[in-house]
Image (cartoon, rainbow, N blue to C red):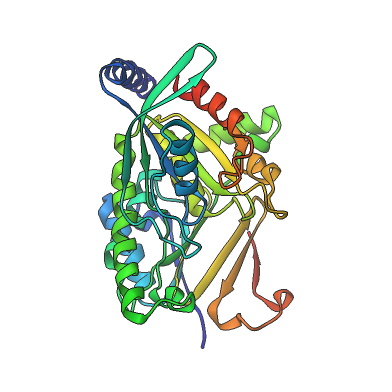
Amino acid sequence: MIKFVGKFIHKVFRDIFRKRKALKIGLYGPPNGGKTTLANRLCLDWLGEEMGSVSNIEHETREVQIKERITVKKDNHELSFSLVDTPGIATKIDYEDFMKKGLTESESKKRAKEATKGVIDAIRWLDNMDVVVVVLDATKDPYSQVNITIIGNLAARDIPVLVVGNKTDLRKASIKKIKAAFPQYDVIGISAKKGTNMEEFYESLFVIAG
Amino acid sequence: MGLTLQFVPYMEIENLSSIGRIRKLLNAVKEDKIVLLEGRLKKEEEAELIKTTMEEINSEFRGIELAVVYPAAHNMAAFRKLKQQFINMLLGDRQGLTIIGPASIVKEIKKDPNKIQLFTTDDRSKPKKARKKAKS
């Protein structure tokens, strides 16, 4: 009962506060799920410019990136927010994995060090988010503990969540598996790279953040 | 090389602070042991465990593999769900099993609602079927 009242008060205050300051929408997920590709797609669609660089080597985004004043328009509605692209959350970072992808030892060690800091920052930023889009690679196993920990922490903080299964342009992609793993959440399948199903994504964003 | 599995009963961490719990588990993992914790950490503690792991990564310690098995209430029929919620109320975080292993030994933990598969770094070259498979 006390927990329920606490959550209610938190929600009321959060909603009042949200109206005063810019809404922050965070992109969270494991590395290489396509968070920055989605951020770039969103920024290209509504600002005409990209947000960050992407790579097939994990941990390309190693610092929290913010793009302010994005306005998404749908019919007669508008949704204005700051987009926060976060480094991928992982439980292990091995510099030798980067060397296998062609980086030198010193580049790999530097990347690993920055990546560990990025994960810490991403977790610290959880408390600053108003809404979170969890971006998962739809070709991978959705039951990974990182996914469950991220979503569990958002639920514990009472932050609204939209789950996105990215990379639906790939043959191995399965949105069904993600829906089975997280039945209590809205799951949208997109290809951020190709821009597939972005309309449904924006509609869901309006529902969850509007 | 043999694997060491260390069972940690929930009562051993029950009265520890969050930092104390994380320290105890991480210390065992850094000794190259695979920890089997009875029950689970709180969600915030799981995030804190990842954060602390990241702070301690160096050339020797490359991180952890983590999996939590917990009865999923959403798949149950209404009566069983109610029963499960009652058990949850009584037992709290004592239910389920948490597996934490050093990334240098445990390459991957694959999990679906009914089973856990532990892939160790030694069996990279072996065919999939020969790999260690543990049913929860």
Question: Which residue is depicted at the point 28% across and 46% down?
Answer: A124
The part of the image, by quadrant, that contains residue A130 is top left
**Residue toward you, B110 or A65:** A65
Decide: is B77 above or below B16: above
Question: In which quadrant is the C terminus of chain B drawn?
Answer: bottom right
**Residue toward you, B130 or B41:** B130
**In the displayed structure image, the side of residue A59 where residue B48 appears, left or right:** left
**Residue toward you, B102 or A62:** A62
Question: Which residue is depicted at the point 63% across and 39% down?
Answer: A196
Decide: is A68 above or below B108: above
Point out residue A202 in the picture as x, y percentages from the top left corner: 54, 28
Decide: is A140 above or below A103: above
Point out residue A206 in the picture as x, y percentages from the top left corner: 50, 22
The answer to whether residue A161 shows anywhere in this view is yes
In the rendered image, the residue lying farthest to the top is A76
**Residue toward you, A165 or A202:** A202
Question: Which residue is depicted at the point 67% across and 41% down?
Answer: A180
**In the displayed structure image, the side of residue A140 where residue B89 appears, left or right:** left
In the rendered image, the residue lying farthest to the front is A48
**In the displayed structure image, the side of residue A149 where residue B125 appears, left or right:** right
Decide: is A130 above or below A90: above
The answer to whether residue B92 shows anywhere in this view is no
Point out residue A208 in the picture as x, y percentages from the top left corner: 49, 24
Point out residue A189 in the picture as x, y percentages from the top left corner: 63, 39
Question: Which residue is depicted at the point 45% across and 56% down?
Answer: A54
The part of the image, by quadrant, that contains residue B58 is bottom left
In the rendered image, the residue lying farthest to the bottom is B1
